[in-house]
Image (cartoon, rainbow, N blue to C red):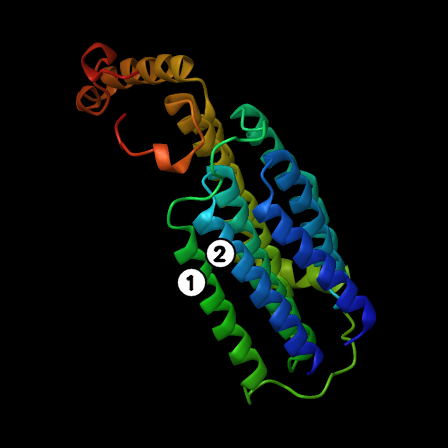
Amino acid sequence: MTPLQGCLLVSALLFAIGLAGAVTRRNAILALVGIELMLNSANLNFIAFWRYGPNPEALSGVMVVIFSIAIAAAEAAVGLALIIAIYRHYRTANLDEMKNLKG
Amino acid sequence: MSPAFLIIAFVTLFAAAAAMSLRNLVHCALSLVVALAGLAALYLNLGAQFVGFAQILVYVGAVAILIVFAVLLTRSDATPNQAILAPGWLTGIVVSAVVFATLGWAALNSTGLPKETPPAPETTVKNIGDMLMTQYVLPLEVIGLLLTAALIGAVIIAMKEGSEKAKIEDGGLKMETLSSPSSILHPPPSSGGHA
């Protein structure tokens, strides 16, 4: 197994853990954390392909990851603000109890 | 594969699994911090210094604190006594196992992956800054605009409903003097039935 394949396997396992958490957990915050883990596993893939792929001087993988981190920060801020607004409305952060769009 | 990589990968995956499976949400947030720091160590191990430190600054510094604040503000810091998993959790586990099997199979059996390990590329922060200011200057500006919009949007969404309503009313009144259709966009709160 080459180092690149090791990175890809770690990233795939991280993605699967994040997906399982985002789909199965009841709490809205934990679903957001799972999405963050999936984004991070994609970043790890970019860095691994940049390191072991051809032409690393172009820095494409590093650039994509820098922009992806910025977008993920914006996404986390807006997502947590939405969760807090929903909590204020429903008095719960449980995804199963949020059933109405106009409560 | 170096032993350092294996140790960091094991710690990262263990912390991620703990973050997704613990009952208490504060423990989940702390495990998430460990997982994100482990990912930063993986980036450093792969030779991407700038990305590793950006990961520590943004994720361990900012996003983790934001998540802890959200946990405390939604009062979900106590250990829940009902089930923590949604009703269809078995399907979710099976789906993610299938996803992992597919990705792992593709990573192990792909023939297009480069076999040899190239020497570590010389990357300095100066190179990254040069690229950001020349080739990637338009995406950089767009990211700046996106972050500004997300900041304003997050503040507006999470604002207290009473003050938000007052603000909208205020803006609606001001806009009404300029254009009449704003009264359609912002109906008076007495008829809206807003809680």
**Residue A93 makes an appearance in the image:** yes
Identify whether B105 is placed above or below A16.
Answer: below
Give residue A52's mark. none
Residue assigned mark 2: A19
Label 1 SS: helix
Residue assigned mark 1: B95
Residue toward you, A22 or B133: A22
To which chain does the residue with label 2 belong? Answer: A
Residue B151 is left or right of residue A48, and the answer is left
Q: Are marks 2 and 1 in contact (CB under 8 Å)?
A: yes
User: Among all residues in the image, which is located at the extreme right?
Assistant: B3
Residue B90 is left or right of residue B131, and the answer is left
User: How crowded is the residue under tag 1: few (<14 C-alpha within 10 Å), some, or many (20+)?
Assistant: some
The residue lying at 72 percent from left, 62 percent from top is B10
Residue toward you, B117 or A92: A92
Q: Mark 1 is on which residue type?
A: Val
Residue toward you, B77 or A63: B77
The residue lying at 81 percent from left, 74 percent from top is B2
